[in-house]
Image (tube, grey):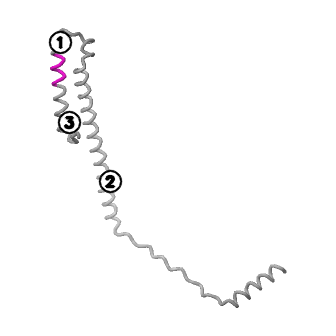
Amino acid sequence: MGSNRTEIRESQKQKFEAQLAARKEVLVQQGLTDAQQKNDKVLQHLKAEVKRTARAVASIAKMRSVVQSAHQKKIDAAAKAAAEGPKKKKHVAAPVKEEKKDKKAKKAEKAEKGEKAQA
């Protein structure tokens, strides 16, 4: 598992760059041209490692900025809430229940409504 510390990634990058420079020097001493050096698998691997560690450093920096901005938003929200004071509870009045009508009164009302509808 890779490290998420910038210092470690930077040291890895420097190590790979040093190895890359040493490998290029060895290839030059062997008399290889730039075109032939591009086909060297060790050189390609070292270039890939430098690229990978550079991306890791950038990713760590981006992750830290995202975390820092989220932390700042949280602090700002807490300060705003503290400035506004405690939230007041909304008091909702309980609905008033109608008294139940007895069955005879209900039947009488239905009968009256039925007569009005027919008329």
Q: Nearer the viewer, residue 58 or 81?
A: 58
Label 3: which secondary element? helix
Mark sitting earlier along the chain (1/3): 3
Q: Residue at x 44, y 73 (%)?
A: 90
Q: Is residue 31 above or below residue 69?
A: above
Q: Is residue 114 above or below residue 20?
A: below
Residue 22 colored in magenta in the image: yes
Residue 5 colored in magenta in the image: no
Q: Position of residue 108 (x, y in %)?
A: 74, 88
* Residue range (magenta): 18-25
Q: Is residue 21 left or right of residue 92?
A: left
Q: Position of residue 60 (x, y in %)?
A: 26, 40
Task: Give the amino acid type for the residue marked by disc 1 in the picture.
Answer: Val
What is the C-alpha distance between the residues marked 2 and 3? Answer: 29 Å
Q: Which residue is under mark 2?
A: 73
- The quadrant holding residue 96 is bottom right
Circle 3 Cα neighbour tier, 10 Å, few/some/many (<14 / 14–19 / ≥20): many
Q: Nearer the viewer, residue 49 or 5?
A: 49
